[in-house]
Image (tube, grey):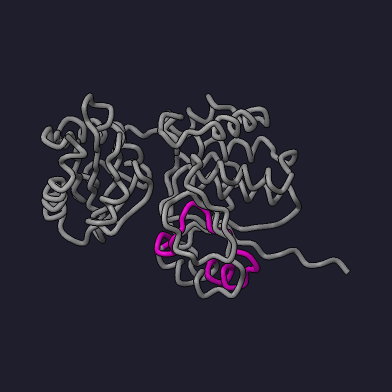
């Protein structure tokens, strides 16, 4: 008698970006090619610039279908946790995953994993979780199963997490993986267009407003800072994904070593940090704003008002003046 197919759930961090959703759908499509059914459960919604990814219409949004998602997680045989290494990164879903009796598999490239998983494919010496999914398929000896759909999802995550192959996280293995994915059918020009040339008019006006009216240049610390209020988000009709990448603009300014954006999300003030050189963005985020991430790219949050958060940030910069000078 044939063995029943394992029940597999794939999940990723809240407000998934291209690496998070790309790795999830890359694995989903790979398992499908192997004849294994799986379900992707996202803790939250995500930007519509990711809607083109093959398999995206099958993703379950936990916030919209909590009962269904909870049942699927509780009944799973395996849960693949992609692009995060601490269960707090999947919000309320984290407690449900922790309590699930099945095996958990973590595939991730962030520092300081929590240790909740039974199995892990983890290293910081890789560009992205999408590159790790490619390596996972390669380890299994199944790269011949990579289709155009799989290749497209994985290429998108690698391309965005490296900032278009500009970041120091771009390794020889990164280019080797993307070359293989292109050979499998990924079309870089179409993927770039789908992600970066698909903005709403309101988002473009919001970016212009932030750069012209909201950006502060703190020359003493070679830092660019943008603070956005909840009212401004409402004014420009900002939706999930519209602020993606905004923090990177500050680093384009000559001499700037740290770029930060603080956004008032009502329930908390969300922060993104991007750095150049030897400034430890993850350490700074962890020390002052309950965050973390990569050395040069991190995130954090604050329960204070946006004014108090901005003040705390500026005061904290003094401790790192030597690194930022």
In percent of width and height, residue 249 lies at: 28, 31
Q: Is residue 81 magenta?
A: yes
User: Which quadrant of the structure image shows residue 321?
Assistant: top left
* Tally of marks: 0
Q: Is residue 212 left or right of residue 199?
A: left
Residue in front for this viewpoint, 209 or 19: 19
Q: Residue at x 26, y 33 (%)?
A: 207
Q: Is residue 282 magenta?
A: no
Q: Is residue 25 visible?
A: yes
Residue in front for this viewpoint, 197 or 78: 78
User: Which quadrant of the structure image shows residue 9?
Assistant: bottom right
> Which residue lies most toward the right here?
1
Where the N terminus falls, by quadrant? bottom right
Where the C terminus falls, by quadrant? top left
User: Which quadrant of the structure image shows residue 44?
Assistant: bottom left
Q: Is residue 63 visible?
A: no
> Which residue lies most toward the front here?
322
Q: Is residue 3 left or right of residue 10?
A: right
Q: Residue at x 23, y 55 (%)?
A: 269
Residue in front for this viewpoint, 169 or 225: 169
Q: Residue at x 67, y 45 (%)?
A: 137
Task: Indicate whether 105 appears above or below 218.
Answer: below
In percent of width and height, residue 66 lies at: 48, 67
In percent of width and height, residue 138 lies at: 68, 43
Q: Which residues are magenta?
A: 69-90
In percent of width and height, residue 193 lies at: 48, 28
């Amino acid at each position: 008698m044939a063995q029943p197919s394992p029940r597999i759930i794939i999940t990723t961090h809240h407000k998934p970006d291209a690496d998070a959703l790309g790795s999830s759908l890359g694995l989903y499509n790979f398992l499908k090619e192997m004849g294994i059914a799986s379900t992707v459960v996202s803790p939250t919604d995500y930007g519509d610039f990711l809607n083109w990814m093959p398999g995206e219409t099958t993703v379950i949004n936990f916030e919209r279908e909590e009962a269904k998602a909870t049942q699927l997680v509780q009944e799973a045989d395996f849960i693949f946790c992609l692009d995060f290494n601490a269960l707090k990164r999947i919000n309320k879903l984290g407690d449900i995953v922790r309590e699930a009796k099945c095996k958990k598999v973590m595939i991730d490239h962030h520092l300081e994993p929590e240790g909740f998983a039974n199995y892990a494919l983890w290293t910081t010496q890789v560009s992205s979780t999408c590159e790790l999914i490619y390596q996972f398929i390669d380890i299994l000896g199944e790269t011949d199963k990579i289709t155009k759909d799989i290749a497209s999802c994985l290429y998108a995550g690698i391309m965005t997490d490296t900032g278009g192959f500009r970041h120091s996280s771009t390794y020889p293995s990164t280019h080797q993986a993307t070359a293989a994915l292109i050979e499998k059918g990924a079309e870089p020009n179409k993927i770039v267009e789908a992600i970066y040339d698909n903005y709403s008019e309101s988002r473009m006006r919001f970016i212009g407003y932030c750069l012209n009216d909201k950006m502060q240049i703190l020359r003493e610390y070679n830092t660019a800072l943008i603070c956005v209020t909840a009212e401004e988000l409402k004014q420009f009709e900002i939706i999930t994904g519209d602020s993606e990448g905004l923090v990177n603009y500050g680093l384009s300014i000559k001499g700037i070593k740290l770029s930060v954006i603080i956004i008032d999300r009502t329930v908390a003030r969300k922060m993104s940090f991007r750095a150049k050189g030897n400034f430890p963005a993850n350490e700074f985020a962890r020390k002052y704003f309950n965050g973390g991430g990569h050395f040069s790219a991190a995130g954090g949050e604050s329960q204070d008002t946006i004014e108090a958060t901005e003040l705390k940030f500026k005061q904290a910069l003094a401790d790192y003046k030597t690194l930022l000078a």
